[in-house]
Image (spheres, rainbow, N blue to C red):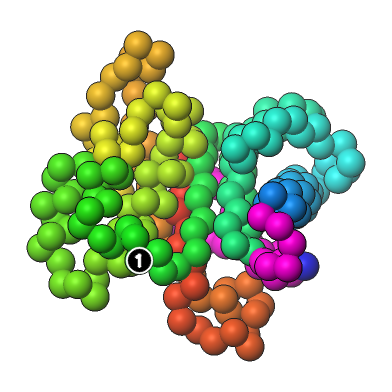
Amino acid sequence: MHYQRYSAPEGVEVQIALAYMPPLEALPLPQRRQAQSHAARQMARWLLSESYPSVAPDAWGLEGGGRHVLRVVAPMRLSISLSHRDGWLACAVSKLLRVGIDIERYPAPSLADEQTWPLYLHAQEQIQMAQLRAEERSLQAMQLWCRKEAWLKASHCAHAIGMESVLVQSDGSVAAVPATPSHPAIPRLDTAAWPLPLCHVGAHNQGDGISAVLALAWG
């Protein structure tokens, strides 16, 4: 499998890796997900070795992995996040910042459907979405979804806050998130999102149209 480094926003100390593997459609869904999860962990070890070459690849201690939550437990404390969807794999690692990453296959027509907006869009975002042309909504909806998924991972609020409570500002920062008993102080994190053609990971024969959206949250 071809791994590729991806650049974080300028000045953001986060290492990112991407890969694309065949979605293995002949396998049942649970087996496909298991294979992609295993491949994402392999890519995580590759990214760790590339980012910290003084550490032997087999010296990295990784634990967890449920719902893509993975922790680096040795030989140094790092923030790490994984995501995989329909053959796309993404990993982010940082020594200085907490990080979350999300990658989703594009397009996802249901996200652009007004009936689904209350499920994941803040009230202000719904107003802004309604003002867009129909052809702009699909990509905007996917970018908002991915930014929020990445933010929920980085903030560790995934089980306490609904997506519709998260407001992504025009500069990518997150605001208007209500405090909860389990998360009384919601961290301020920034986000960024990028549309990806398959050629980003070496699959040049697949064309250069948008095939996925990648988002990163950090802070």
Residue 214 visible? The answer is yes
Q: Is residue 60 left or right of residue 34?
A: right
Image location of residue 50, percent across then percent down: 75, 53
The stretch of residues the image draws in magenta is: 2-29
Q: Which residue is painted at 65% across and 34% down in the image?
A: 66
Amino acid beneath label 1? Pro
Image location of residue 12, percent across then percent down: 47, 48
Q: Nearer the viewer, residue 26 or 78?
A: 26
Image location of residue 68, percent across then percent down: 61, 40
Q: Which residue is painted at 37% across and 51% down in the image?
A: 145
Q: Label 1: few (<14), some or many (≥20) within 10 Å?
A: few
Quadrant for the N terminus in the image: bottom right
Residue 8 visible? The answer is no
Q: In this picture, is 172 found above or below 61?
A: below
Q: Which residue is painted at 51% across and 56% down in the image?
A: 103
Q: Quadrant of residue 177?
A: top left
Q: Which residue is painted at 22% across and 53% down in the image?
A: 115
Q: Which residue is mark 1?
A: 109
